[in-house]
């Protein structure tokens, strides 16, 4: 019995999954800094941090953004090449040399959206390089959002015709941004929690506590957006319970939902059990084990999130269930 | 049966009728209709799909009962609709072969016939 679908394009699925994960990390690093870290530093709700500590945190997030952007661009180029071969039905080498690549880039929506996202990647790189200018941070933030949201126009949502298509692509863009903010944001959070647990002074764990609470709020908003837009996507691409359980696409979506619920369980444990313990602890000996637990749970959530990116990489190459029933 | 149910079943019915479609953009309906008989030869063949199409990788080829190509070779694409003009006005069986790339980057192909004559 074929549980999912025969003839899946493994290189295409792999490059899509890597590209989605790298994009999420890039965008999330920018969101994390703008919405979580900087407001936490400015709030004064924790013990005073040294400028060395805050500069080190900002540098760590900047490194993460650079790495994410590099992998996003590299995997994006590979994605375009693999898609060009897939669209034209010719081998990869021939697709690169026969004008097919030019046709894909100039005459298909996928190619044009990839070019626009590449331009935003260049803008983001320039903004990261000249980060000392205040406006550069806002341009970087906006470019990061555009790079993630732009993926919506390359997939199923981008091809849905009519007014339903407008709603589909808007919902999918929001879904991508929410997923990036939550799943991608776990990486800078985990790095910061791990660093805080190694600190001997209380200032860093105190900041980590403030940041964790702020990230929890961002996580709640993201989960609400993911649930709402996920329902819209499922309604358009699956359409019925029967399609959900009797098609490969539907079964894979169920698997994605199961992994999503597992992530939610870890997030809820972190939010409602571990985070309050950070707030109430003024003793470093009590905080450190909690920080370790939070770090470990965040790493598990990241692994589950990457599993979801792999599933999404596969879903985008499959028949939407609604077309099969 | 309500209209929405009929519309939902229509692509599957066409899929079974053509027997070849196998990916994302599926043939929703065609004019002349799949398998139908029309009194006079149409000036063009138009196909409607379930998703938006990429003009650069979407084509229709029409042949007559002898296998001779009778379309002008210039496929026009507008959203999820695709047309090609015909050069022949003769009676007989026409074979329509289509290959499309939907905007979500997936290729689909299929074929059907229609008849012209009394």
Image (tube, coloured by chain):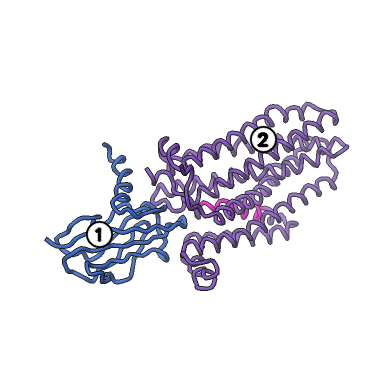
SS for tag 2? helix
Give the percent coordinates (x, y) of residue A246. Answer: 42, 38
Please tell me the colour of chain A: purple
A99 to the left or right of A24? left
Q: In which quarter of the image is the C terminus of chain B?
A: bottom left
A139 is within the stretch colored magenta: yes
| Number of the label disc, if any, that sits on residue B113 | 1
Chain to which the residue tagged by mark 1 belongs: B
Question: Magenta segment range?
Answer: A138-152
B55 to the left or right of A100? left
| Number of the label disc, if any, that sits on residue B52 | none
SS for tag 1? strand
A310 to the left or right of A61? left
Q: Residue at x 28, y 62 (%)?
A: B96
**Letter of the chain in blue:** B
Give the percent coordinates (x, y) of residue A118. Answer: 59, 61
Give the percent coordinates (x, y) of residue A95. Answer: 51, 68
Disc 2: which residue = A216
């Amino acid at each position: 019995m074929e549980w999912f679908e025969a003839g899946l394009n493994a290189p295409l699925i792999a490059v899509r999954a890597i590209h989605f994960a790298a994009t999420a990390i890039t965008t999330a690093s920018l969101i994390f800094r703008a919405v979580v870290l900087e407001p936490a530093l400015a709030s004064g709700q924790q013990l005073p941090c040294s400028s060395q500590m805050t500069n080190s945190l900002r540098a760590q997030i900047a490194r993460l953004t650079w790495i994410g952007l590099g992998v996003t661009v590299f995997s994006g180029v590979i994605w375009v090449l693999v898609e060009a071969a897939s669209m034209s039905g010719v081998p990869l080498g021939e697709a690169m040399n026969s004008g097919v690549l030019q046709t894909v880039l100039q005459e298909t929506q996928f190619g044009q959206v990839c070019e626009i996202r590449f331009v935003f990647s260049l803008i983001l790189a320039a903004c990261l390089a000249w980060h000392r200018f205040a406006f550069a941070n806002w341009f970087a933030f906006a470019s990061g959002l555009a790079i993630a949201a732009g993926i919506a126009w390359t997939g199923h949502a981008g091809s849905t015709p009519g007014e339903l298509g407008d709603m589909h692509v808007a919902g999918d863009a929001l879904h991508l941004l929410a997923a990036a903010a939550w799943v991608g944001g776990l990486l800078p959070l985990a790095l910061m929690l791990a660093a805080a647990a190694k600190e001997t002074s209380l200032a860093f764990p105190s900041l980590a506590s403030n940041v964790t609470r702020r990230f929890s709020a961002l996580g709640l908003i993201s989960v609400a957006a993911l649930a709402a837009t996920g329902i819209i996507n499922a309604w358009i691409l699956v359409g019925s319970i029967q399609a959900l359980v009797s098609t490969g696409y539907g079964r894979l979506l169920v698997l994605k939902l199961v992994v999503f619920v597992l992530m939610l369980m870890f997030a809820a444990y972190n939010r409602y059990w571990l985070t309050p313990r950070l707030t109430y602890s003024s003793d470093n000996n009590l905080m450190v084990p909690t920080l370790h637990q939070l770090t470990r749970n965040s790493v598990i959530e990241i692994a589950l999130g990457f599993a979801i990116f792999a599933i999404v990489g596969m879903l985008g190459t499959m028949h939407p269930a609604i077309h099969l029933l | 049966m309500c209209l929405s149910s009929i519309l939902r079943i229509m692509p599957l019915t066409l899929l079974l009728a053509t027997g070849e479609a196998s990916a994302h953009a599926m043939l929703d309906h065609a004019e002349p209709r799949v398998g139908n008989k029309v009194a006079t030869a149409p000036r063009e063949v138009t196909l409607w799909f379930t998703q938006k199409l990429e003009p650069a990788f979407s084509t229709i080829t029409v042949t007559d009962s002898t296998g001779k190509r009778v379309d002008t070779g210039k496929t026009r694409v507008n959203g999820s609709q695709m047309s090609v003009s015909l050069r022949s006005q003769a009676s007989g069986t026409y074979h329509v072969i289509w290959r499309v790339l939907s905007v979500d980057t997936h290729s689909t192909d299929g074929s059907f016939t229609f008849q012209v004559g009394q």
